[in-house]
């Protein structure tokens, strides 16, 4: 039975790798356009796809729609959908890279405590005014520093004399994540009581406060990360086989791991800064993408950006509509999807990602 599963997985990977990348990206692009159109059109005021694209086309061509419909589409819903897409793409990319970095299929920024560390930094900014002199960059700075500190702590605690032990890394990440969450709770308790409710809702993940001003930072962070990661696609494939095999192929493993450490912390920190803590996206979506396109990261990364963006836009749409007119934190939606998937990954872990074997 185990051999059959392993052979089946190998066939699925080879089949995915035989599918032309352009076809996969085209299909994912169409899916993203459809989900984004639904995300903009669905709401208390229902809008048809024709109305949505009429407003967007008017803005692009310099003929803005000043009606109520135009305001709803361009000022409220489009920024929210774009922000959800950026965060979904960033978390998916970060998750795929972290799984290679630590060679563990169950790793992602949420499970390793990186997101919780970022939330400590962001909460300190929101409640205590830390980095207030940085203005609109304050929350992003706090989140990124918190993510860097969290990942450094997890790596330091879990490192053994023979390098990183995957199982120990996950356990240390879970424990330190609980520690970071307790620090966040302490900051909330000691902070401004008037801001407590909004911070608690933000910690569960939400795009309810999305605006055009929030888009440049995550967009720039994602673009910079993708440029670097796509250039390192071949070395990521080598690192997935292990540090020693990668070094034998001429890869500077220590430098590569340091750079990946910084890139994943940057993406996780920026994502937390604009959306709060959203778990399981970086764990679940990379595995779905690998089943579609194979394990080559030159294919996984671009497909993951598009599919992860669609996944998050759809999740935000569910969060807005399931309990309408109220809004459910999106972290609840991703947890409902991710927790059962995590159980499946734990049971079938050796067959879902060759690097864990």
Image: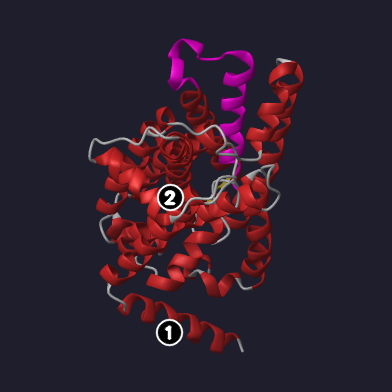
- Looking at the rendered image, the disc whose residue lies closer to the viewer, 1 or 2, is 2
Q: Is residue 125 above or below residue 80?
A: above
Where's residue 53, x and y in %? Answer: 35, 50
Label 1 residue SS: helix
Name the mark on residue 89. 2
Instruction: State the residue at coordinates (41%, 38%).
Output: 70
Graded by Cα atoms within 10 Å as few (under 14), some (14 to 19) or many (20 or more), the crowding at tag 2 reads many
Q: Which residues are magenta?
A: 111-138
- Residue 152 included in the magenta stretch of the image: no
Graded by Cα atoms within 10 Å as few (under 14), some (14 to 19) or many (20 or more), the crowding at tag 1 reads few
Instruction: State the residue at coordinates (54%, 37%).
Output: 275
- Residue 137 included in the magenta stretch of the image: yes
Label 2 residue SS: helix
Tell me the distance, in whole angstroms, between the alpha carbons under discs 1 and 2.
Answer: 27 Å
Instruction: State the residue at coordinates (57%, 26%).
Output: 122
Q: Is residue 295 above or below residue 67?
A: below
Q: Is residue 332 above or below residue 65?
A: below
Q: To which residue does mark 1 refer?
A: 11
């Amino acid at each position: 039975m185990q051999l059959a599963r392993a052979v089946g997985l190998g066939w699925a990977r080879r089949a995915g790798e035989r599918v032309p990348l352009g076809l996969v990206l085209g299909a994912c692009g169409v899916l993203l356009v459809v989900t984004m159109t639904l995300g903009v059109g669905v709401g208390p005021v229902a809008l048809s796809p024709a109305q949505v694209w009429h407003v967007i086309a008017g803005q692009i061509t310099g003929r803005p729609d000043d009606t109520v419909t135009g305001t709803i589409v361009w000022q409220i819903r489009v920024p929210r959908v774009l922000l959800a897409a950026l965060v979904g793409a960033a978390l998916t990319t970060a998750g795929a890279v972290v799984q290679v970095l630590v060679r563990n299929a169950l790793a992602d920024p949420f499970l390793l405590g990186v997101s919780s560390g970022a939330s400590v930094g962001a909460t300190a900014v929101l409640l205590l005014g830390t980095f207030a002199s940085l203005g609109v960059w304050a929350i992003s700075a706090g989140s990124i520093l918190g993510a860097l500190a969290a990942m450094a702590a997890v790596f330091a605690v879990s490192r053994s004399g023979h390098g990183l032990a995957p199982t120990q890394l996950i356990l240390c990440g879970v424990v330190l994540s609980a520690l970071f969450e307790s620090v966040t709770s302490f900051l909330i308790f000691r902070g401004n009581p008037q801001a407590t409710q909004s911070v608690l809702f933000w910690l569960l993940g939400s795009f309810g406060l999305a605006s055009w001003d929030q888009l440049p930072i995550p967009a720039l962070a994602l673009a910079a990360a993708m440029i670097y990661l796509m250039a390192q696609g071949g070395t990521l494939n080598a690192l997935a086989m292990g540090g020693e095999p990668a070094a034998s192929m001429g890869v500077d493993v220590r430098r590569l791991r340091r750079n990946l450490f910084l890139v994943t912390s940057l993406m996780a920190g920026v994502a937390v800064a604009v959306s709060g803590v959203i778990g399981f996206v970086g764990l679940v979506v990379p595995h779905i993408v690998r089943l579609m396109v194979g394990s080559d990261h030159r294919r996984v990364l671009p497909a993951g950006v598009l599919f992860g963006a669609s996944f998050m836009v759809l999740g935000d749409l569910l969060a807005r509509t399931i309990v309408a007119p109220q809004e459910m934190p999106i972290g609840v939606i991703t947890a409902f999807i991710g927790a059962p998937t995590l159980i499946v990954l734990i049971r079938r872990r050796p067959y879902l990602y060759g690097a864990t074997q």
